[in-house]
Image: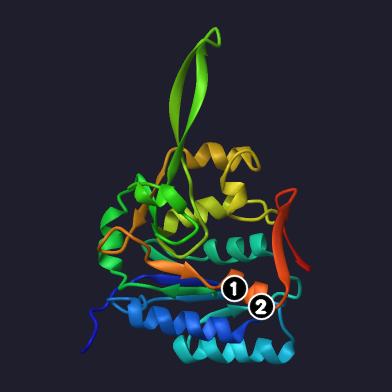
Amino acid sequence: MTKPVFHGAVTLTAVRRPDLLARTLASFTEALRQGFPVGPVFVNLDPVMGDARAQTECRDVVRAHFPEAKIFEPETASFGAAVIRLWTRVPDGPVLHLEDDWTCLHEIDLDAARHFLNGKTTMVCFRNNHHGRKGEQDYSETRHRYPVLWGLIRRKRRVPLFNTGPALADGSFLRACALRMDATLDPEKQMRRPMNPELNDWLERYRCRFLKAPDGGLLLTDDGREWRAARGLDKHVADGRSVWSSR
């Protein structure tokens, strides 16, 4: 059956893991109700986790799904620089942002996600196993208490929690967000206080909503941790930067 057409752009961050990349794109091909958006595709392929052969295989996987994709292959890997490189190039309108290590658990309706993009809500994250209990809420956010009178009276302030995992977002928002990012820092971590105060202050005017499975559950699960564990690799953040190490 022919899928309805959804117009928009696609961004994809990936490293040299052709097996994961192929599985992720196959999973989204099956799960996206409207199929991949029809429009420009921007891919960043960082030179880590594999050799030159794996790089070529990743490029072939991307071309099989997106023959006209613009593929960036920097000489030095940087997750922060990768996100900035992609997001600064997107057009206005909806943008499907992806990473290379996810499996879809249910059908994903991009029209339903786009319905939530209204100028105030600028990103719709697909609920996944990393969201925890916060994923039960409508919006990805937390509440911070702050003093307002002699340090005695405290009020709660809503603080949005934006993500770099699979999501549908407003293109103009992504461009403006990327311009405020620091390429040396983990892109998701700097969207949370206190790593990038300028970016954090700016983000507080917007909201990030969850798109969930029909039963309110997860839409996606992360395959990256299992892949790293099988190869004895760990990922942690030090001074705002993602660091990979062998066990």
SS under mark 1: helix
Residue 203 showing in the rendered view: yes
Residue located 54% across and 81% down the image: 21
CB atoms at circles 2 and 1 under 8 Å apart? yes
Other residues around mark 1 within 10 Å, as few (<14) / some (14–19) / many (≥20): few
Residue located 66% across and 73% down the image: 228
Please name the amino acid that badge 2 sits on. Ala
Q: Is residue 148 left or right of residue 217?
A: right
Mark 2 highlights which residue? 230
Say which quadrant the C terminus sits in. bottom right
Report the front residue among 6 and 105.
Answer: 105
SS under mark 2: helix
User: In the current view of this chain or complex, which residue is farthest to the right?
Assistant: 246
Q: Is residue 175 left or right of residue 206?
A: right
Above or below: residue 154 compared with residue 49: above
Instruction: Where is residue 145? Give x, y as percent.
Output: 49, 25
Instruction: Where is residue 133? Give x, y as percent.
Output: 42, 49
Above or below: residue 245 compared with residue 31: above
Above or below: residue 51 compared with residue 146: below
Mark 1 highlights which residue? 226
Q: Which mark is residue 24?
A: none
